[in-house]
Structures are given as structure tokens and as C-alpha cells.
Amino acid sequence: MKIVYMGTPDFAVAPLEAIIKAGHEVVLVVTQPDKQKGRGKEMQMTPVKECALRHGIPVFQPVKIKEASAVEELAGYPADIFVVAAFGQLLSEEILSMPKFGCVNIHASLLPAYRGAAPIQWAVINGERESGVTIMQMEKGLDTGGMYCKKSVPIDKKETGESLHDKLMAVGAELIVKALPKIESGELKPEKQDDSLTCYAPRLSKSMGLIEWEKDAEVIERLIRGLNSWPSAYTYYRGKTLKIWEADVTDNGREKEADDIPGTVVKVEKDFFDIAAGKGVLRVYCVQLEGKKRMSVKDFLLGYEVKPGLVLGEAKQ
């Protein structure tokens, strides 16, 4: 099939590689514009652009895909189907209707659950036991189109947003390659979603990583895993941001007492410290202080004082 591929982050690279390897002709790759990154403000290409250039595929980077000039550019690349994976912009109805087989999306959830921008992370945050990938026909609504096929993936007890991302990226690549010839032959027909079963996965923001110690320790632990590696969960240590990368809910040793303020350090050992939550105790193993590298609590305690009674989470001054 002749394909226009739309995608931007790492998640979209493996499916593009798989489509190329399967022998399809990718006539154009559409991705977000290059952005300045780092202290040097150097322009950085998207992962999908880097992949396309390695394979000698033309790249188009519209600021707004719905603008007339962008639509005209797309029309100049006749394709049987558009494949979309975490592109980052909504497509107009004019674009959706361009190719013979329409536009299909590689969505990182078992639709109709977790429509939206961040299904991977929210599945971990909400304590789901499984996630997966759905190949769906795109329409005007947000992830509301008919489903061609899906594959489930169990969510491990210590799954992080990053580890689940990598699993689903591989599944997405596998599934789209299997689906494309069946879509072309008519063997696969889109199945309507049951809107009554949907829930949404809104876009992530740095602010949502602020730990609210009044919540249950189990809820906080899932937040830490779900937001690993971005945007990360954090609290404040003596007025500085302290990211928490690895933690467990614990019932061992010193328990949270009724008069403990949530966020209070209740126990310190050489390689962990325990923090009282609204319900339960969180045991912390890996942190990152503002301006420093990620480190084990054992290393952190060599340079910074943490004693029982210290209250974390006070707003930065």
C-alpha cells in the first residue's frame, strides 16, 4: 500500500520501521516541527523525522495541519491510507477523507477505554490490570472511530509509564503490519465503539506530578510509577523540588500514627525512608533533588539530612 505516515515521538518510530520493513511504500512522513531543547536551545528533530530521513522518506512538518496550505501539500502525495500514531494534532474532515481507505490510528489503549492524549500513563495511575493497543478508523471525534483490531497487554505490579510505553510501542508495530493488508482486502471491518464504556486520558502536565500526601499511599505509589519518566512525581524538600522515582507501599516497621501530618518522615534507614500518607506509609528508594542527578536514597542520605519528623511537601519559597 502507498502510505502517508503521521507521528512524532518515540512511540511512533517502531510502527514506521515495521511498515517499511513489511514492504509498504511510505510516500511521506508528517511530523511536528523541530523544537528548541536544552540549555543551548539547539533545534531538535522529532524521533519520527530522524527515522524518516534515515530511510530517505520525504518529511512534512506543518505548524497547523488543518491550514489550507498544509491540506494542499498532503493532497500532492496520493496514498491508499494515512497511518497515524501519536502525531499531536487533530485532523480535519477534509484530510480524514483524502485516502481511499481513510485514516487509521494506532491508539495505546483498549478502546473505548482511555480515549485521549495520555492513555498509557493514566492506565498505570488508575491501577488498571491490563492495557493494550487498538487499530481504529479515524473520524471527527476524539478516538471515537470504529475499531479494526486490538491486542491486550498485562500491566505488571511495578509497571511504569515508560515500561508500558515500550511494550505498547512494540505491540502497535506488530498490530498495524497485520492489519494493513486485511484492511485493504476488506477482511477487517471497523467495529463500532460502545460509548457507555469510555473514559478519558487527558494530556499530562508537570503540575499533576505534585504529590498530595493526604492521599492513600497506594494512590501516590501508582502516580510515581505512572509519571515515570515524564513528567515525574515530586514533592518539596526544604523548599527544593524532590522527584521521587521509586517507592513502595509498606506495612513494615514504624507505622503511621493518627497524629502524623501527611508528608512526615516517620522512619529512616540507610537505603530508604518512610513517609506518612493520608492512609498508609510510602517507602522511598530513589530520588532526584532539584539541579542534581537521579540517585538512590542511600546516596542521597550521604549528603542531605533526613530525620523522622521532617515534613515534605511544603511549597517552594
Image (cartoon, helix red, strand yellow):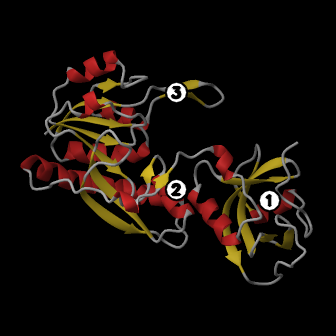
Task: Provide the residue designation for mark 2.
Answer: 121
Task: Provide the residue designation for mark 1.
Answer: 300
Decide which of 255, 301 is in the foreground and name it.
255
Question: At which x and y percent is residue 200?
Answer: 47, 53
Residue that appears at 53% across and 73% down: 157
Tag 2 secondary structure = helix
Residue that appears at 41% across and 58% down: 198
Quadrant in the rendering for residue 194? bottom left
Quadrant in the rendering for residue 178? bottom left
Horizontal side of 26 relative to 272 (left or right) equals left
Which mark is first along the chain, 1 or 3? 3
Which quadrant of the rendered structure holds the C terminus? top right
Residue that appears at 80% across and 84% down: 253
Tag 1 secondary structure = helix
Question: At which x and y percent is residue 28?
Answer: 25, 29
From this viewpoint, is residue 82 visible? yes
Marker disc for residue 1: none
Distance from disc 1 to disc 2, alpha carbons, whole Å, reads 27 Å
Decide which of 68, 144 is in the foreground and name it.
144
Marker disc for residue 35: 3
Residue that appears at 38% across and 67% down: 153
Which mark is first along the chain, 2 or 1? 2
Neighbor class of circle 2 (other Cα within 10 Å; few <14, some 14-19, many 20+) is: many
Which mark is first along the chain, 2 or 3? 3
Horizontal side of 247 relative to 289 (left or right) equals left
Verify CB contact (< 8 Å) between mark 1 and mark 2. Answer: no
* Residue type at the position of mark 1: Phe
* Residue type at the position of mark 3: Lys
